[in-house]
Amino acid sequence: MFSNRKELYKKLESKLNSKVILYATSDRRGAESQIAQDAIDIFIAQLDKIGINEKISLILYTRGGDTAAAWNIVNLLRQYCDEFQVVIPHRAHSAGTLISLGAESIIMTKQATLGPIDPSVNTPLNPIVQAGQGPVQIPVSVEAIKGYLAFAKEELAIKDDMALSNIMVKLSEKVHPLVLGQVYRARMQIKMLAEKLLIQQVTDAAKIKEILAFLCSDSGSHDYTINRREAKDTLGLNIIKPDDELYTIIKAIYDDFSSEFGFGIPFNPVTMSQTTGDSSYNVKRAVIESLYGGSDYFLTEGRIIKVVSQGNKIPSSPGNVPVPTQQLKDERLYEGWKHEN
C-alpha cells in the first residue's frame, strides 16, 4: 500500500540524494496493463508537485507498451531535472527499456532485466485468429516480419526475384499491406527514438549503432532478457549496482506494490467470486506515485452477476417446458485512474 511505501521513498530519496517517483504497470495474468498515453497527464500532475530538481529517480516496472508514450515520459521527466535516473527492481522491458535508455544512469538489482525494443503493431487491420473466447485480433511483431523474410532469403537461400515476389504476396494475404507498411515505419521510428535517447549514456556513434542493432534485431526474440552484467559489459550502458542497503530499500518497494497488484495470482473474477462468495471486485493495474503528488492508480472495478435464460426445451421434461440455465457475467462498473493523497 502507498502508506507502507512512503517511509521507503523517504529512505530512497536520502540514499540517492534525489526525488523519487514510481511508475509500475501490472503483468498479473488477466489484469495486465501497459505504458500508455493516459499516463502523461498523471505524470504532469505528479511532477508539478515535485517541482524542478537537480535529480529525479524513476522506479520503473513494466513489460512495455506504447513507444510514443515512453518517449513522451522521458522528455517530460527531463524537463523537471538536470539528471534523470531509472531504478529497475525487476523488469523494464520493451518500452520500459526505451525509457531507461533516456536516463544518465540505470540502477539495476541482481534480478533486474531489460529487453529488446522491437515494437509490435496494433491496428484495426491486424490479422484475426480464432481463440477460445472467439475471434481475436493479434499484434504484428516487427521482428517476426523481418524474421520471415530473412528465413526465406538466408535459410532457404531463395534468390529468384519471382519467388521472392510470391513470398511477399503470400505474406500480404495474411497481413494487410498497410499493416506491413506500419511495421516498417514502427521499426524506423523506434531506432530513431532510441538513438536520440542513448546520447544520455553513450557518445560513441559506432557503439550506439551496435547497441541499437542488438536491441532491435540481433537479440533474436522479443522475449530475450538482458541482465545487469550484459547491460553493462556487453552493451556498455551506465549501469549502477546497488549496495546492500540500497538493494534492501528497492526490493522492499517492489515487494509491497507486487503484493498490492497480486503478482503471481491469476485474476479471474468469476472463479474468485465462486471461491469467496463475494460478487464485487476491484484490481489495481498501474500506479504512478510520489511523496509529493500522492498515489494515482488505474483501477478496474466490477461485479459478477447471475444471468438466467429460458434455455432449451427438453422433450423428456414434464410438459416439454424450457429448462432455465444460469450463467455468471462479468459486469465492469468502473475503469480508470483514481487518486489517493
Image (cartoon, rainbow, N blue to C red):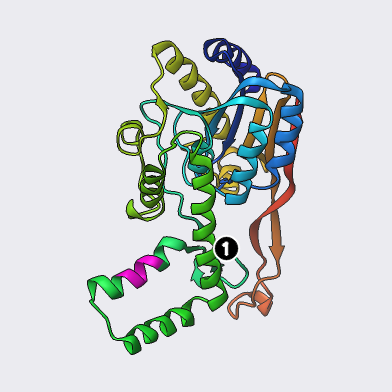
Q: Nearer the viewer, residue 25 or 203?
A: 203
In the image: residue 221, left or right of residue 49: left
- Residue at 59% x, 44% y is 70
Indicate whether residue 199 is drawn in magenta.
Answer: no
| Residue 265 position within the rendered picture, expressed as x and y whole percent measured from the top left | 49, 39
Whether residue 35 is visible here, answered yes or no, is no
Tag 1 secondary structure? loop
The relative height of residue 314 versus residue 210 in the rendered view (above or below) is below
The C terminus, quarter of image: top right
| Left or right of 198 on screen, residue 286 | right
Predominant secondary structure, magenta span: helix
Instruction: Left or right? Give the position of 69 relative to 336.
Output: left
Q: Residue at x 49, y 59 (%)?
A: 187
Residue stretch in magenta: 146-150
Q: What is the three-letter code of the residue carrying label 1?
A: Asn
Q: Please identify the quarter of the rendering in which residue 14 is found.
A: top right
Quadrant position of the N terminus in the picture: top right
Which residue has dot 1 on it?
Answer: 122
Above or below, 254 against 74 in this view is above
In terms of image quadrants, where is residue 178? Answer: bottom right
User: x, y percentage for residue 305?
Assistant: 70, 52
Of residue 237 and residue 301, the one placed in the foreground of this image is 237
Mark yes or no: residue 204 visible. Answer: yes
